[in-house]
Structures are given as structure tokens and as C-alpha cells.
Amino acid sequence: MDYLQKALQTFNDTNGVNWYGWKTHDSNGDKIPNDQRMTYANIKIIKNGATMPSESDVNAKIQELKDAETQKETDAFNGKQKLKDLGLNDAEIKALIG
């Protein structure tokens, strides 16, 4: 998952339209390699009225997204384990929840 982009999309309510893009050249005019462009330092605002969130706010949102994903995985594992504890086998659990 691209956590940086997921996090950026939560800032500047723009009805699903990206408010940001990526710089292609640095301040010296040198081309930024594609594999290095998608970083906080290379964000550029492309929508009028949008504001740049702080890097700490973006990092906090990234951590929030990661924590939510981890919690979802933990809940799924725990739920399956509870079904096993009730006597269901793996095939039965898969038939119920995939």
C-alpha cells in the first residue's frame, strides 16, 4: 500500500480530486529520478486553495493508517481463532468468511 498517497488524500477536502502532484526537477533544475520523486520533499500543490500539511501531520496519518491495517489483520486472526475454538475447521471458516 502506498501509505504516503493514502495519507495525502485525507488532507484538503477536494471531492476526490488530488490536490497534490510530484516535482519532476529539483531546485537546481536537475531531473528527480522517478524512484525518488514520491517523497514529502517533492510534493507540489496543484489545486488552488489547497494547503500543504506539515510533514509531522502526514507522518502521523501514515502511522494511523498502518495501525488501522494492523488492527484489521489482528481482528481477522482473532475472529478466526475464536471460530476454531468453537470447533470449526479451516474449511468451514473459509466457507463462512472466505
Image: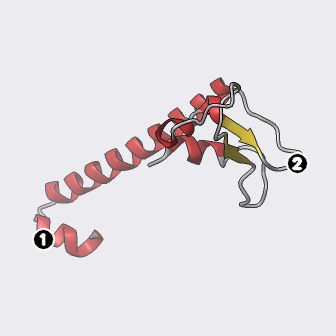
Residue at the far right: name it: 49
- Name the residue nearer the viewer: 35 or 73: 35
- Name the residue nearer the viewer: 25 or 72: 25
- Identity of the amino acid at label 1? Ala
Q: Percent from the top left, x then y, of residue 40?
A: 61, 32
Which residue occupies 88% across, 48% down? 48
In the drawing, does residue 94 fall left or right of residue 76? left
Which residue occupies 73% across, 59% down? 17
Residue at the far bottom: name it: 95
- Identity of the amino acid at label 2? Asn
77 vs 91: above or below: above
What residue sits right under mark 1 in the picture? 91
Q: Quadrant location of residue 89?
A: bottom left
Q: Quadrant of the C terminus?
A: bottom left
Secondary-structure class at tag 1: helix
Which residue occupies 71% across, 60% down? 16
Q: Quadrant location of residue 31?
A: top right
Which is more foreground, mark 1 or mark 2?
Answer: 2
Q: Percent from the top left, x then y, of residue 15?
A: 77, 60
Q: Quadrant location of residue 55?
A: top right
12 vs 85: above or below: above
Secondary-structure class at tag 2: loop
- Label 2 crowd bin: few (<14), some (14–19), many (20+), radius 10 Å: few
What residue sits right under mark 2 in the picture? 48
